[in-house]
Image (tube, helix red, strand yellow):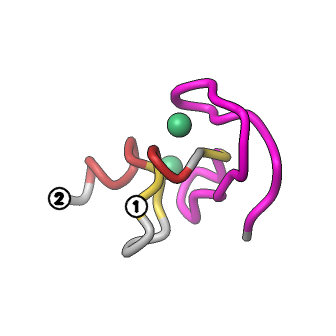
Amino acid sequence: MEREGICSICGKPGVMHSCKLCGRLVCSECYDFKRGLCKICAAKFT
Ligand SMILES: [Zn+2]
Ligand SMILES: [Zn+2]
């Protein structure tokens, strides 16, 4: 799911992706596309 917003991690505006674990909206830089997780959640599963 994609939508315009402000990244919950770095605060940049743009197209956001929702983390399927925590639901946080994050930018593409803060999102792990392979896993569908924000980088905070992705870090827990490495
Ligand atoms: Zn970000
Ligand atoms: Zn997350």
Nearest to N terminus: mark 1 or mark 2: 1
Closer-to-camera residue (40/5) = 5
Q: Amino acid at mark 2?
A: Thr
Residue 33 position in % (x across, y down): 44, 69
Q: Amino acid at mark 1?
A: Asp
Q: Which residue is mark 1?
A: 32
Q: Residue at x 69, y 51 (%)?
A: 16
Single out the residue that lies furthest toward the left. 46
Q: Residue at x 57, y 58 (%)?
A: 19
Closer-to-camera residue (21/7) = 7
Q: From the image, which quarter does the C terminus lie in?
A: bottom left
| Left or right: where 37 falls relative to 7 | left
Question: Closer to the observer: label 1 or label 2?
Answer: 1
| Left or right: where 38 falls relative to 11 | left
Is 7 situated above or below 39? above
Residue 7 position in % (x across, y down): 64, 35
In magenta, the rendered stretch is 2-24
Q: Secondary structure at mark 1?
A: strand
Is 8 situated above or below 39? above
Q: Quadrant of residue 11?
A: top right
Q: Residues within 10 Å of mark 1 (few under 14, many from 20)?
A: some
Q: Which residue is mark 2?
A: 46
Q: Is residue 6 highlighted in magenta?
A: yes
Q: Residues under labels 1 and 2: Cα distance?
A: 11 Å
Is 30 situated above or below 45? above
Q: Residues within 10 Å of mark 2 (few under 14, many from 20)?
A: few
Residue 6 position in % (x across, y down): 73, 34
Q: Secondary structure at mark 2?
A: loop
Is 1 situated above or below 39? below
